[in-house]
Image (cartoon, grey):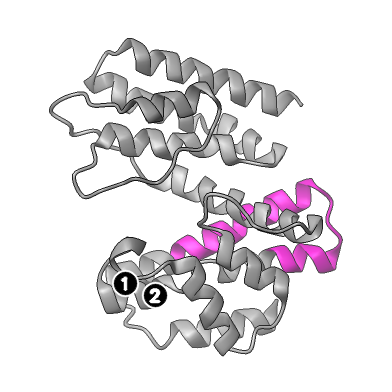
Amino acid sequence: MKEALELFNNYYDKFDKTLWGVYMKYDHTFRVVDYAKKIARSINLNDEDYDLACKCALFHDIARFKQWQEYNTFEDKLSFDHGDEGYNILKELGVDDEIILTSTKYHNKYAVETNDERTLMFCNITRDADKLDIMMKQNKECNDEEFILPEDIIESFRNNKLTYNKIETESSDVCNILRCVAFIFDINFKESFKIIKETDIVNKKFDVILEKFDNEIIRELKQICNEYIDERVSD
């Protein structure tokens, strides 16, 4: 891990740390590493695999520094796919571990494309850790003036499915909060669900909406999520 940290920090040092997006993603990276450590411990990985899980988390967002400094955005559609670009950056830096490369490439995709169970495990640790930090840190306000909720988002909750990322500039806070909450349907490890339950983060996000809009559908989706989390924690 020491060599990986040196490689990561040397790359990070090339960017302007006074830029909000650059230092924010640096902090995000190490919170994701901490979540990955908790997940890795919970499934009793050996020392070598524990170290590998940490490396995957460390490198997952390496393209974000370039994305913010060059494009002043974290929207991939306005710049580049940061998973794909992260893969390319790591290759240029001499990283040749296919599990690290694949975890970086697919951490932000709707699904992981691999038939190798070991690779999938490390990808899922990274994806869980990343989603946990996003859930904890983002989408905490609802400033919508009117309640708008597309049917596809409602159906994704009813079917326990991750929503597709259709976030546009004009997206409502309600939609953005719910897309974030729907991350639970792509969470893989019991430890991740324990963290979600212990922090009560899902109820907190629903309550942000309910404080603004006392809506029956939102209460239904909240119940669906709580039942799903309880089931996964008790598995």
- What amino acid is found at the position of numbered circle 2 in the picture? Phe
Q: Residues within 10 Å of mark 1 (few under 14, many from 20)?
A: many
Q: Where is residue 47 in the image (x, y as percent from the top left)?
A: 84, 65
Where disc 1 sits, the SS reads: helix
Compared with residue 33, is residue 169 higher up or lower down, i.e. above or below? Answer: above
> How far separated are the C-alphas under marks 1 and 2?
5 Å
Query: Residue at coordinates 52% horizontally, 49% vertically from top-left?
Result: 110
Q: Which of 181 and 37 is in front in this view?
A: 181
Instruction: Give residue 170's quadrant in the image.
Output: top left
Of all residues shown, which one is farthest toward the left?
Answer: 145
**Cβ atoms at labels 1 and 2 below 8 Å apart:** yes
- In the rendered structure, which segment of residues is drawn in magenta? 27-53
Q: Which residue is labeled 1 in the image? A: 68
Under mark 1, the amino acid is: Trp
Q: Is residue 97 within the magenta segment?
A: no
**Left or right of residue 212, residue 61 in this image:** right
Front residue of 194 and 168: 168
Q: Residue at x 53, y 53 (%)?
A: 130
- Reading the image, the residue beneath label 2 is 65
Q: Which mark is residue 118?
A: none
Which residue is at the front of the view, 119 or 206?
119
User: Is the magenta region chiefly helix, strand or loop?
Assistant: helix
- Element at label 2: helix
Residue 190 relative to residue 204: left or right: right
